[in-house]
Amino acid sequence: MTKSLSSKNKNNIKYVVAIPSYKRHLSITDKTLRVLEEYKIPPSIIYVFVANKTEEKLYRGQFTNPYLKKVSIIVGKKGLKNQRNFISKYFPSNTNLVQMDDDIKGICKMGNYNKTARKENTLNRLRNLDAFIKKGFYKCKEKSVFLWGVYPLCNAYFMFPRVTDDLRFITGPFFGMINRHSPKLRLTLDEKEDSQRTLQHFVMDGGVIRFNDVSIHTSYYKNKGGMQDERKDRKKEAMKSAMYLIKKYPELTKLNVSKKSGIPEVKLIN
C-alpha cells in the first residue's frame, strides 16, 4: 500500500552512513570520505567499521583533518558478510542506514537522455547527496519497502531516468536500508552478498527501490585491500555463491557467465 508523505517529512528524515573497510586506511580518505566531505555530509553521522584494534589504530592515524577527526571508527568483524551483519546489529531497528564501500571515487547522475540514440546520453556529478539519500528513504516509506539503491555502473548508455520498485539488483557499494534485526536478513555469503541482500528484501517486502539514473564511480574487483586482500579465488567463490542463490531462489535467478571480468554473476528474473 502506498503511503502519503509530505515533502516536509522527506526533509526531516535522519540517517547514518556506515562504511565497512579493511586494509584501506591509506586510500579511504582520498575516496569515499573525501566524497562525503565534498558533499558536506556531517562527519558526526559517519561510522567506519574496521576488523580489529590494529586496524583501528592505523585508520585513526590517517584521520587527521578536522572533518575526519569527527568520524567514528568502530571495531567490528573481519569478513564482509560478518561486518555487514555486525553493522546491522550495531544500529537500532528502524534506523535509516546508508552503507557505502570505502573506495568510491564519485557519484554520477544522468544528464541528457535519448532513448533512441543512447550514445548521446550524458552523465553529470550528482549535485546534492544529502537530498538524494533522503529521497531514497522517502521512496521506501512511500512504497512500504526497506531497501533502495542505484544503477550498478556509471554508464549513461545503459542507465535510464526512472525509479523502479520491482526486482532489480541493488549493488553493494552504495545502498540504503531501513534497518531490521530479522534472521531472514542475515547474510551468509561474502561473494554475492549484495545479490543475497536484494533477494532477501524482495522476498520479504515484494519490492526494492532502484534509482536507474544515479550510480557510483568505483572499480569492482581491482582495488587493493578489502576482499582482494583475503587471497581467495574470487571466481571460484563467486561461482559457489551464485549456485547457492540460484538453488535457493530458482524462480527469481539465472546464472550469467558472459561478463568480460570472468566473474560469474546472478541474473535476477523480473
Image (tube, helix red, strand yellow):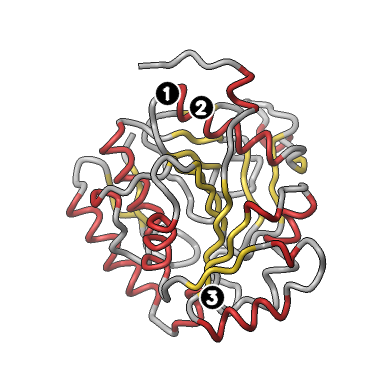
Comes first in the chain, label 3 or label 1: 3
Residue holding disc 2: 139
Res 143 label: 1
Name the amino acid, label 1.
Lys
What's the residue at 42%, 40% (across, down)?
A: 94
- Image height check: is 25 above or below 147? below
* Mark identifier at residue 162: none
Front-most of residues 70 and 216 = 70
Q: Position of residue 269 (x, y in %)?
A: 31, 39
User: Which quadrant holds residue 188?
Assistant: bottom left
Q: Label 3 amino acid?
A: Tyr
Determine which quarter of the picture holds residue 119: top right
The reply to whether discs 3 and 2 touch (Cβ–Cβ < 8 Å) is no
Q: Is residue 246 above or below residue 109?
A: below
Circle 2/circle 1 CB separation < 8 Å: yes
Indicate the position of residue 9 as horizontal and vertical percent values.
58, 22
Separation (CA) of disc 2 from disc 1: 6 Å
